[in-house]
Amino acid sequence: MIKVAFYDTKEYDRASFEKLGNEEISYKFLDTKLNIDTADLAAGCDAVCVFVNDAVDGAVIDRLYALGIRMIALRCAGYNNVDVKHAYGKIHVTHVPAYSPYAVAEHAAALLLTSVRRIHKAYNRTRDFNFSLNGLTGFDFHGKTAGIIGTGKIGRIFIDICRGFGMHVIAYDKFPVPDSDIEYVSLDELFTRSDIISLHCPLTDETRHMIDASAIEKMKKGVVIVNTSRGALIDAEALLDGIKARKVGAACLDVYEEEADVFFEDRSGHILNDEILSRLISMPNVIVTSHQAFLTEEALENIAETTVQNILSCFHNDGICDNELCYRCGDIEACKKARKQRCF
Ligand code: NAI
């Protein structure tokens, strides 16, 4: 039996893993996030399963390794919260590279439509029998320019959605898709030409705060910024300044730089200590959802299925798992996975 401690689980996580079931894996569901204070809850387990806001840094990895943990199974795509370099040689790390890119791209579109057409305002008004249209003027998507940063699985689906609305799409990616019909431009050109900017790239040292004060300075007045990727791609303080200066027309945020202590929990009875988040939420042209873009039935089912497969592959036979990650992945010379071997 492979024993797995599942950190930061909610009702919907448990339901999807329990529904799938597997007689070779025993689940230990924990409410708490993984950090150095909670690592010992995994004692007696073979693996841990973590999500986007579990902090799996070097100290946590060393503690898990000392406890005999040999696998970290991320039940998400992004892995910026795991020090994969530190884990190398000690603990195998896997992720779920794609569970439903449609879920995330469609949520980005939902946020964008809601914001630009003021649906959130209209919903509240009509519930109060206020049928006034004052202040609800939006703009047509048709004919506008959408700038997409990151043209991977989610970015490309979002491009199709934008084209469906009749938008002109330009894109920036560090690794453009070869021979595609996507019009790639430099990041600066994307900033200056786009009416709508949507982020679909991973969080790395290079992309941290890619939307900062100087990027916002280059943007069109009234630009709408959509972020369903990772919060720290945007310098939240600079965004707030851009909104206050009326430079940024609207922001649609499913992720936030300091979300780890706030998102996924009911804080309605508490006073929020995060001044920037409070101020952003108070703005009439900002919509915040709580890292919800992945949350569809299809995505939860796929996450559970792939995570279970990753765990079984890691502990069985030759231990080779297509979804294993290490800091050498992608480096043609060094990547063992590319040669159908374990990362270490
Ligand atoms: P992907 O790996 O298919 O695509 C990422 C794209 O970003 C690739 O084309 C890559 O070349 C590009 N990229 C890498 N470095 C870049 C850079 N420095 N500048 C510009 N582009 C760069 O990933 P996928 O599945 O499309 O996911 C994108 C992001 O969405 C993930 O990294 C994750 O952070 C986020 N995400 C958010 C979810 C949510 O619930 N809000 C759920 C799932 C993913």
Image (cartoon, rainbow, N blue to C red):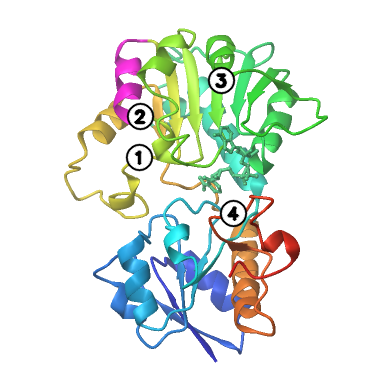
Which residue sits at x=46%, y=58%? Answer: 85
Local secondary structure at mark 3: helix
Q: Are marks 4 and 2 in contact (CB under 8 Å)?
A: no
Name the mark nearer the viewer: 2 or 3: 3
Taking the image as drawn, is residue 255 in sight? Answer: no
Q: Are marks 1 and 3 in contact (CB under 8 Å)?
A: no
Which residue position holds label 4? 296
Name the mark nearer the viewer: 3 or 4: 3
Of the pair 266 and 125, the residue shown nearer to us: 266
Which residue position holds label 2? 235
Which residue position holds label 1? 257
The amino acid sitting under disc 3 is Leu
Position of 65 with respect to 171 (left or right) is left
Residue 136 in the image, given as x and y percentages of width and height: 46, 15
Residue 163 in the image, given as x and y percentages of width and height: 73, 24
Outermost right residue: 179
Please report whichever mark, 2 or 1, sits nearer to the chain's N-terminal start. 2
Quadrant of image for the N terminus? bottom right
Which residue position holds label 3? 187
Local secondary structure at mark 4: loop
Please report whichever mark, 4 or 1, sits nearer to the chain's N-terminal start. 1
Does mark 1's beta carbon lie closer than 8 Å to ligand 1?
no
Does mark 3's beta carbon lie closer than 8 Å to ligand 1?
yes
Span of residues in magenta: 236-246
The amino acid sitting under disc 2 is Asp
Q: Residues within 10 Å of mark 1 (few under 14, many from 20)?
A: some
